[in-house]
């Protein structure tokens, strides 16, 4: 990058079917993995599978791109996206959502939204935008562009009963009036309209309807797309994975894959690292869930709430650079009542003390809350306390999840995360 900073574009040009860039606060890794699952049946994909999504990671991915790769699927950090997009000149750009995340690095989400507006205004008109229309800030990026696909959920039956405390963009991006929501699905994502008529959710090209959620086992929904309707069976839980699937199917459609075929291929999808990854350990099962901001944590907790009875939970909070030094976001998680069914909760990580304090404010029974700073030791203790056939739910920030991955690798239970994919 220092010697030939313009060479990223030259490397990307080798991919004759073009590059798809995927960015969002929540879901970009899973969406990229889903899109790879759809496309890999027909072609070799160049992808930053290990999640290195800054400019350096994108450069490394393109340098090591397989010789026979025809298409690039690149997840890109929200702050790095304008630089990467200018370099690789994507054919398709997927923009999913914006939430408060790593405020010490990104700043407030309005700053990221402003940068994205400037970026989109400067894109080649031939670029296809795939937009998460449930997010007002993302939907507003459409402007007057022609090549746009909007995706979102359209099923009030699975809407939240009340406003999420972690909701962010709830005021009109044009006039500042508070949006009216017909349905709010997660965070500030939903079906909204400005009472002054300045903005409302755009018409959905890819819509999830008749959604059925089955706890941690997965979800099913009817996909209504420009080329017809089909059923999507996802082995991942939660509405946010419904959103991820919609984004992946829409991006694949932009590349010429029929939506029904893409839906069919997602039935065999395997979870990305730490995103509801399930690992068998000594007759028990550990379910790994990455958490990094209030909305993501809320959705993870809601997805597992019905399955916690009699099982152990580990919540690991680190404050490394990759996690974000500011951990005040834990006070915006809706913890009240959600962990009550668990047999025990262990707080771990470099900020385990703050996490334990947060659980005390959530009125969780002190007798069922423990603190073990070392993440590997905490997971081991939870496994030992779990009955045969039971489950351990591990909610961890990024660097804590990497510690868990290394520990599991040493025990031969999983593959190294940084193993290069070919």
Image (cartoon, grey):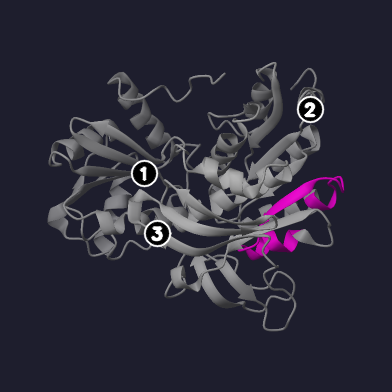
Residue 62 counted in the magenta span? no
Residue at 70 percent across and 16 percent down: it is 67
The span shown in magenta is 120-141
Residue 90 — which label?
A: none
Residue 16 — which label?
A: 2
Say which label, 2 or 1, has the lower sequence index. Answer: 2
The residue indicated by pointer 1 is 317
Q: Which image quadrant is residue 252 in?
A: top right
Residue 125 counted in the magenta span? yes
52 is higher (above) or lower (below) than 184: above
In the figure, is residue 364 to the left or right of 142? left
Q: Quadrant of the N terminus?
A: top right
Q: Position of residue 45 (x, y in %)?
A: 64, 27
Say which label, 3 or 1, has the lower sequence index. Answer: 3
The residue indicated by pointer 3 is 213
Residue at 72 percent across and 42 percent down: it is 256
In the figure, is residue 18 to the left or right of 105? right
How many marks on residues?
3
In the figure, is residue 114 to the left or right of 410? right
- What separation in Å lies between label 3 and label 2 (alpha carbons)? 39 Å
Q: Position of residue 105 (x, y in %)?
A: 58, 45
Q: Is the C-beta separation of discs 3 and 2 under 8 Å?
A: no
Q: Is residue 328 visible?
A: no
Say which label, 3 or 2, has the lower sequence index. Answer: 2
Give the secondary structure at mark 3: strand
Give the secondary structure at mark 2: loop
Q: Which image quadrant is residue 93 in?
A: top right
Give the secondary structure at mark 1: loop
């Amino acid at each position: 990058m220092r010697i030939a900073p313009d060479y990223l574009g030259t490397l990307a040009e080798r991919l004759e079917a073009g590059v798809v860039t995927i960015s969002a606060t929540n879901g970009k890794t899973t969406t990229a993995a889903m899109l790879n699952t759809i496309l890999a049946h027909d072609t070799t994909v160049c992808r930053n599978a290990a999640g290195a999504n800054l400019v350096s990671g994108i450069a490394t991915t393109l340098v090591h791109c397989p010789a026979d790769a025809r298409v690039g699927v690149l997840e890109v950090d929200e702050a790095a996206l304008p630089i990467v997009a200018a370099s690789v000149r994507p054919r398709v750009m997927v923009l999913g959502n914006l939430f408060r995340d790593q405020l010490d690095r990104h700043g407030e989400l309005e700053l990221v939204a402003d940068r994205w507006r400037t970026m989109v205004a400067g894109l080649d008109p031939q670029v296809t935008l795939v937009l998460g229309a449930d997010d007002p800030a993302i939907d507003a990026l459409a402007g007057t562009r022609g090549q746009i696909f909007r995706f979102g959920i359209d099923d009030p039956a699975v809407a939240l009963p009340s406003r999420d405390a972690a909701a962010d963009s709830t005021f009109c991006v044009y006039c500042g009036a508070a949006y009216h929501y017909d349905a709010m699905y997660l965070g500030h994502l939903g079906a909204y309209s400005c009472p002054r008529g300045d903005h409302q959710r755009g018409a959905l090209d890819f819509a999830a309807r008749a959604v059925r959620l089955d706890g941690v086992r997965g979800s099913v929904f009817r996909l209504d797309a420009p080329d017809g309707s089909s059923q999507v069976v996802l082995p991942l839980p939660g509405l946010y994975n419904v959103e991820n699937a919609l984004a992946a199917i829409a991006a694949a459609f932009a590349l010429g894959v029929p939506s029904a075929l893409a839906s069919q291929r997602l039935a065999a999808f395997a979870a990305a690292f730490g995103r509801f990854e399930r690992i068998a350990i000594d007759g028990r099962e550990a379910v790994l869930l990455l958490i990094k901001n209030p909305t993501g944590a809320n959705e993870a907790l809601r997805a597992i709430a019905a399955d916690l009875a009699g099982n152990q939970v580990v919540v690991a909070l680190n404050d490394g650079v990759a996690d974000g030094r500011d951990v005040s976001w834990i006070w915006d998680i809706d913890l009240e009542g959600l962990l009550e069914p668990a047999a025990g909760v262990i707080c771990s990580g470099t900020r385990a003390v703050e996490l334990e304090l947060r659980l005390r404010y959530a009125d969780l029974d002190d007798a069922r809350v423990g603190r073990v700073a070392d993440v590997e030791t905490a997971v081991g203790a939870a496994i030992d306390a779990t009955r045969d056939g039971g489950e351990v739910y591990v909610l961890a920030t990024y660097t804590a999840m990497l510690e868990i991955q290394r520990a599991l690798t040493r025990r031969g239970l999983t593959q190294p995360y940084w193993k290069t994919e070919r």
